[in-house]
Amino acid sequence: MSTQTALADLEQEIAAPGAGPDRLRLVDTPFVPEVRLHLAEDAILWWARMEAAAGRSLPPPYWASVWAGGQALARHLLDHPELAAGRRVLDLAAGSGLVAIAAALAGADEVVANDIDPYAVAAVTVNARANRVRVAADSDDLLDGVADADLLVAGDALYDAGLAARVLPYLRRCADHGVEVLVGDPDRGHLPPDGLELVASYPVPTTEPSVDSPVRRVQVLRPR
C-alpha cells in the first residue's frame, strides 16, 4: 500500500460522521496534553473494521494507540526544550508521531518522523497538521545506516526481541557517529544489561488494556 492511499483512508476516517470505540478521535495525549492525536478508543476494533472493508490484511495499527515510552520521551522533550531547539531531530519508529510533534513544539529546526508502516506515515501527517507543526514523514528502513540528525529519539521502539536486535546496534552506531540518542522505554524485557544510562524516569498513565497497573514507570535512557 502506498502512503498516499493510507493518507486518503485516514482522512476519510477522520471526516466520517459517527462515533464509537472503532472510530478515530482527536484527543489530548494523557501524559502530554500539549499534543493532540487522532487515536482509536479500541485499536483492535478499528483494525478489524478496516481489514473487513479492505478485504485484506493490514499491519497492526500501533500508531492508533499512545505508547508509554513515547509519552515519557515527549514529556521529556517538552520539559527540556533545549534538547531539541534549533536542531535536526529524527523520530525512529514514530507511530502516531507524538515524539516528533513534541520535538517540533520544543523548537526543533527540522523534524523527520520515520516509520515503515504507511498508515503510521499517514498518521504523522494528520497529527502534525492537527498540532500545527511541520514534521516530515519518511517510510524508509533506516536501520542499516546512520541517522542524518543531531538528535535521534526512539519511543517504545524495543517492544519485541527481533526489532530490538536491529534497533539497538543502530542506536549505538548513531551515537558513535556523534548523534545524541534518547530512548523512551517501559522495560518490555529487551533492554541490554549495560550500554544505556538513565536520564529520567516518569510515572506514565497506562493506556494499554493488557497492563494491570494504572501507572507505568518509564525510563528515558541514552547510550553510555
Image (cartoon, helix red, strand yellow):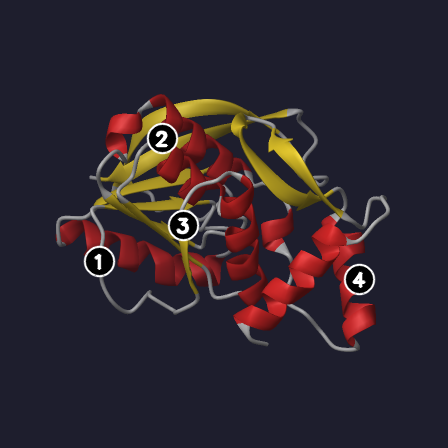
Q: Quadrant of residue 83?
A: top left
Residue shown at the point (83%, 49%) measured from the top left: 17
The percent coordinates of residue 187 (x first, y second) are: 47, 39
- What is the three-letter code of the residue carrying label 4? Ala
Q: Could you classify mark 4 by the number of other residues whose Cα lies within 10 Å: few (under 14), some (14-19), or many (20 or more)? A: some
Disc 2: CA contacts within 10 A as few (<14), some (14-19) or many (>=20): many
Within-10-Å neighbours for mark 3: few <14, some 14–19, many 20+: many
**Which residue position holds label 2?**
77
- Which comes before the other along the chain, label 2 or label 1? 2
Mark 2, mark 3: which one is toward the viewer? 3
What secondary structure is marked by label 1?
A: loop
Q: Mark 3 — residue?
A: 135
In this view, the residue in front, 99 or 180, is 99
**Which numbered disc flags the more N-terminal residue, 4 or 1?**
4
Q: Which residue is mark 4?
A: 48
Which residue lies at the image location 40% right of the left edge and 47% below the top edge? 134
Image location of residue 1, percent across then percent down: 59, 76
Residue that badge 1 annotates? 148
Q: Do tag 2 and tag 3 residues touch (Cβ < 8 Å)?
A: no
